Amino acid sequence: MIFTIAAPVLFGLDRVVIIFFGARAVIDGILSVGMMVAFLAYKDQFSQRVGKLMDSLVKLGTLTVHGERIADIALAEPEQGDTGDTIGSAAAIISPKPGLSARGISFRYSESEPRIIADFDLDLAPGECVAIAGPSGAGKTTLLKILAGLLRPTAGSVLIDDVPLQSIGLEAYRAQIGCVLQDDRLFAGSIAENIAGFCSSPDHERIQQVARFAAIHEEILRMPMGYNTLVGDMGSSLSGGQMQRAVLARALYRAPRILLLDEATSHLDEDNERAINEAIRRLPISRVIVAHRRSTLDMADRIVPIWPTLVATKRTA
């Protein structure tokens, strides 16, 4: 911003000064008018070149900012991949209705920061629906990402049917779960492609089935091209509520054995929220729900509170 403002001001003042002294030189007979005009022409070319050079230097300087952003991803430690045989054998460990447990889960983003979650325990029985409730900043979303295998806890472990997640393998585990997070997005393509996860051979009947479950089937049919309607970049052509329901349908298309929902109905009106909550209640799979709305919490079998570590420390004291 400083360069953008300063550059035209400096070059403008520079031209005023040169014209002032050049005019005096012409009046005094030191320069001719032709020499004055030629000098100004060369001076303008020189100023333009210098301005472009300075602009390029400023742009090069801003590359360090972009480099730091890319480095967060490029320099991140890659996950240990699983082989095909490992995935097959590990997936067989997960029962049709698995139980999910968290033992002594603690998490912090760096050693210099306080713990977001401290010694949290959770037991999810097969086919049970548990709601995680707590104030903003208590670590509910972070906990759900840990349960989904997206974050590695600082301490503690996640178990599926009493088998540690590390023994099952992340790829095999993620193939068995459906997850809807607050910042989930759709990709450029049709609604059907997004619901099917851009599968090479999608099941169109199942796409419509999960869309009905997510209470978006009728709205899709009213769109110009139905399920072939393009959602635009990052789902820009859909409303917040429509995008949220499409993401829920995408999670259900995978036929997950465990469903993790983080404010999955926060953008919906009461009627759609009630319909989806009732449908989720009837699902015969294990479910973990993070929500603030009382109507969503009430549809769970039980509610597990989670508190910020500072509050938890005061309560313990």
Image: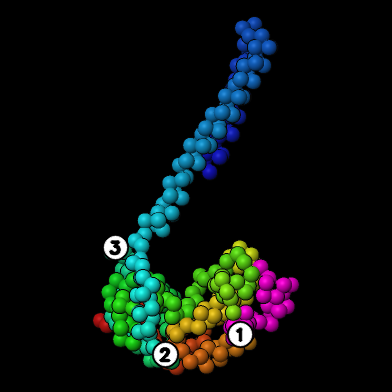
Overall secondary structure of the magenta stretch? Answer: helix
Of the pair 208 and 82, the residue shown nearer to us:
82
Circle 1 is placed at which residue position? Answer: 209
**Mark 3 residue type:** Ser
Callouts 2 and 3 close, C-beta under 8 Å: no
Marker disc for residue 128? none
Alpha carbon distance from label 2 to label 3: 40 Å
Element at badge 1? helix
**Mark 2 residue type:** Lys
Element at badge 2? loop
- Residue 226 position, x and y percent, is 70, 75
Alpha carbon distance from label 3 to label 1: 48 Å
The image quarter containing residue 108 is bottom left
Horizontally, residue 257 falls left or right of residue 162, namely: right
Is 286 rendered above or below residue 147?
below
- Count neighbours of disc 3 (C-alpha within 10 A) and say few if under 14, some if 14 to 19, many if 20 or more: few
Which of discs 2 and 3 lies nearer the camera? The answer is: 2
Determine the residue positioned at 47% across, 83% down: 256
Marker disc for residue 97? 2
Circle 3 is placed at which residue position? Answer: 112
- Residue 249 position, x and y percent, is 57, 79
- Residue 12 position, x and y percent, is 60, 29
* Magenta highlight range: 204-230
Alpha carbon distance from label 1 to label 2: 21 Å
